[in-house]
Image: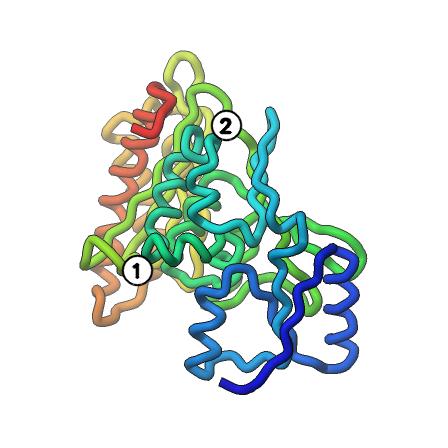
């Protein structure tokens, strides 16, 4: 690993100014949120920044709060802390489960959802869960702030929509109302410490008659980036989640999946598992619509 400078700005203004200075000087700056991906990549020679900007002292990146309408998770909030936040545990159990799949307990004490998202792994567990729950990325720019749906944030393998000089500050989602439930499940060759061969997230909302008024299905590890499977969700809206509706959603997801073949599974295997997981995840989210808990 080559030498680098380290700085930890303590305000948005200081962070913005330092990024602008680095950009003007042609200095390769890298933002550090948790560091569990970045430091490994640096040791392996995959990244060689001249400047590390640690954003954990910027208050906005450490926000973990909710009001009646919005949940906010700062980009550098440790995964373990986000998972334990009462609203996440109670109203976003699928996301909480996805967070719990990030490495070991030690890794979760350091890793962040923001860093996980910026790393943009196709197999990242939290990304489909964030997409399914309608999270938006709040981004610091040279001129102010902009927001972007998480499904538009990841643009490819290890690539995201941040322009030069921009930083992810926080992730925000609407607080779900009654008769709403989410879920996330993945398939891996091993039960622990592995990455997803396929990952599926869902957020469903019913009316008082049990008819689905909204359905968001997100797929991971079956394309260069996790994505919102709109056709799969559309197959569920207007139904009560009957078996034929689940089959239609699964078929739509399988059609949209564009997986690769590698040593961990063939493309055909991944596509079939995708359909199986869609049905399981939707069934679990449906149950949570009526129970309102992390069952």
Local SS, label 2: loop
Image disc number at residue 51: none
* Sequence-wise first label, 2 or 1: 2
Q: Residue at x 49, y 85 (%)?
A: 1
How packed mark 1 is, by other alpha carbons closer than 10 Å (few <14, some 14-19, many 20 or more), is many
Q: Which percent across, then down, holds residue 81?
A: 47, 44
Tell me residue 3's x, y (percent).
57, 85
Point out residue 134 in the picture as x, y percentages from the top left corner.
52, 40
Crowd around label 2: few <14 · some 14–19 · many ≥20 (10 Å) = some
Q: Residue at x 73, y 75 (%)?
A: 22
Count how many numbered circles sit on residues in the image: 2
Q: Nearer the viewer, residue 285 or 229?
A: 285
Q: In front here: 36 or 114?
A: 36
Image location of residue 43, percent across then percent down = 44, 80
| Residue 229 in view, yes or no | no
Circle number at residue 195: 1
Q: Residue at x 77, y 61 (%)?
A: 14
Residue tagged by mark 2? 176
| Colour convention of the picture | rainbow
**Secondary element at tag 1:** loop
Q: Quadrant of the C terminus?
A: top left
Vertical arrangement, residue 51 with respect to residue 280, above or below: below
Question: Does residue 267 appear to the left or right of 225 in the view shown?
Answer: left
């Amino acid at each position: 690993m080559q030498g680098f400078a380290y700085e930890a700005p303590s305000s948005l203004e200081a962070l913005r100014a330092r990024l602008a200075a680095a950009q003007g000087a042609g200095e390769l700056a890298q933002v550090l949120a948790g560091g569990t991906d970045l430091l490994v990549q640096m040791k392996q020679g995959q990244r060689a920044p001249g400047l590390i900007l640690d954003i954990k002292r910027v208050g906005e990146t450490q926000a973990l709060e909710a009001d009646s309408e919005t949940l906010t998770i700062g980009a550098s909030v440790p995964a373990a802390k986000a998972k334990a936040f009462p609203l996440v545990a109670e109203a976003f159990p699928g996301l909480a489960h996805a967070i719990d799949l990030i490495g070991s307990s030690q890794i979760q004490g350091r890793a962040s959802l923001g860093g996980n998202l910026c790393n943009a792994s196709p197999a990242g567990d939290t990304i489909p869960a964030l997409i399914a729950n309608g999270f938006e990325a709040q981004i610091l720019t040279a001129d102010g702030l902009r927001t972007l749906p998480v499904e538009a944030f990841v643009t490819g393998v290890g690539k995201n929509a941040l322009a030069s000089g921009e930083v992810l500050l926080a992730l925000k989602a609407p607080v779900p109302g009654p008769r709403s439930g989410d879920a996330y499940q993945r398939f891996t060759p091993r039960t622990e410490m592995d990455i997803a061969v396929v990952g599926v997230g869902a957020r469903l909302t019913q009316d008082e008659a049990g008819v689905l008024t909204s359905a968001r299905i997100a797929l991971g590890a079956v394309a260069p980036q996790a994505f919102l499977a709109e056709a799969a969700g559309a197959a569920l809206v207007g139904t009560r989640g009957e078996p034929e509706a689940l089959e239609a959603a699964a078929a739509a997801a399988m059609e949209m999946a564009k997986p690769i073949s590698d040593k961990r599974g063939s493309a055909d295997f991944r596509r079939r598992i995708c359909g199986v997981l869609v049905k399981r995840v939707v069934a679990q989210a449906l149950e949570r619509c009526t129970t309102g808990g992390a069952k």
